[in-house]
Image (cartoon, rainbow, N blue to C red):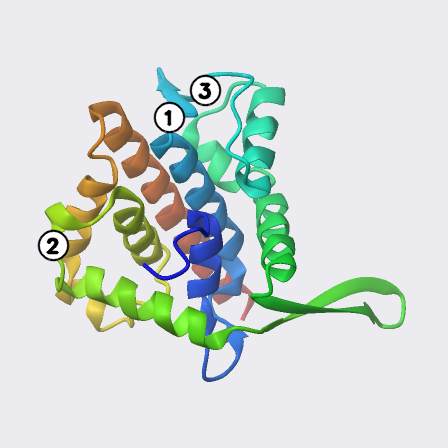
Amino acid sequence: MPDDSLSLPARLYLLSWDTERLKVTGATDLHHLVRAGALTELAQRGLLADVEGIATPVDPDARTGDLVLDGLLELVEESRPRKWKAWVTLRARVTLDAVRAQLVAEGYLGAEKKRVLGLFPSVEYELARASAVDGLRAEARQVLVGAVPVADVSDRDAALVALAAAAELRTLLPGKDRKLYKDRIEELTERSGAAAPALKKVIQEVRTAVMVAVTAGVATGAAGS
């Protein structure tokens, strides 16, 4: 995929951008999706392991060199033991903020500091490299629609599409496509954890947690409307 040096959470965040309207879609639950991507990549790299359902650091001295991933790894290390689904939501905005800062530093986003009501500090982000996001989305769509055999898809690319589908990310998977590619998405979910049986369990649990978070967000929005 283009921009393969980007982490899984960074790519999921970029996929959330609508490059025609130049705005982020699914912003309500985006932090959960980005956190799920970070957990998944750490698990795929073998830095977080499943110990009786608990997300457990494998080596306290191990680091990836990626500030977003290492920040989450340190947070898990310094916190009390928790299940994977808890980490999908717990302080998830910290990971989202770290991803945005990283993408600003790398030139994918622009950022402008403002004050809401003249008092509260806020940051507005704009997409600076729409063509890169279009390329990323095109490659992800090829993975989704079956242009590439599942066996030839990397575990990280498979996780990208599986998690984006779990979060109902419309920029990649319009509503009409969810049933159409249901079987393919399940195959990609399996492929995401192909390295080990325990990893398959982790991927499935993280993906389910994202789906639950999205459903809860939709219900909350409907109740407030």
Instruction: Report the residue marked by disc 1.
Output: 46
| Residue at figure coordinates x 53%, y 52% from the top left | 31
As measured in the structure, the alpha-carbon distance from the residue carrying label 2 to the one carrying label 3 is 31 Å
For the residue pair 175 and 115, the one nearer the viewer reads as 115
| Residue at figure coordinates x 56%, y 34% from the top left | 70
Mark yes or no: residue 201 visible. yes
| Residue at figure coordinates x 58%, y 19% from the top left | 80
Instruction: Report the residue marked by disc 3.
Output: 56
Amino acid carrying mark 2 in the image: Asp
Amino acid carrying mark 3 in the image: Thr
On screen, residue 50 versus residue 73, left or right, reads left
Position of residue 50 relative to residue 108, above or below, is above
**Element assignment for label 3:** strand
Instruction: Report the residue marked by disc 2.
Output: 183
- The 10 Å Cα crowd at callout 2, few under 14, some 14 to 19, many 20 or more, is few
**Element assignment for label 2:** helix
Q: Residue furthest right?
A: 119
Which of the 4 quarters of the picture holds residue 60?
Answer: top right
Q: Nearer the viewer, mark 2 or mark 1?
A: 1
As measured in the structure, the alpha-carbon distance from the residue carrying label 3 to the one carrying label 1 is 10 Å
First of labels 2, 3 by sequence position: 3
First of labels 2, 1 by sequence position: 1
Which of the 4 quarters of the picture holds residue 73?
Answer: top right
Which of the 4 quarters of the picture holds residue 95?
Answer: top right
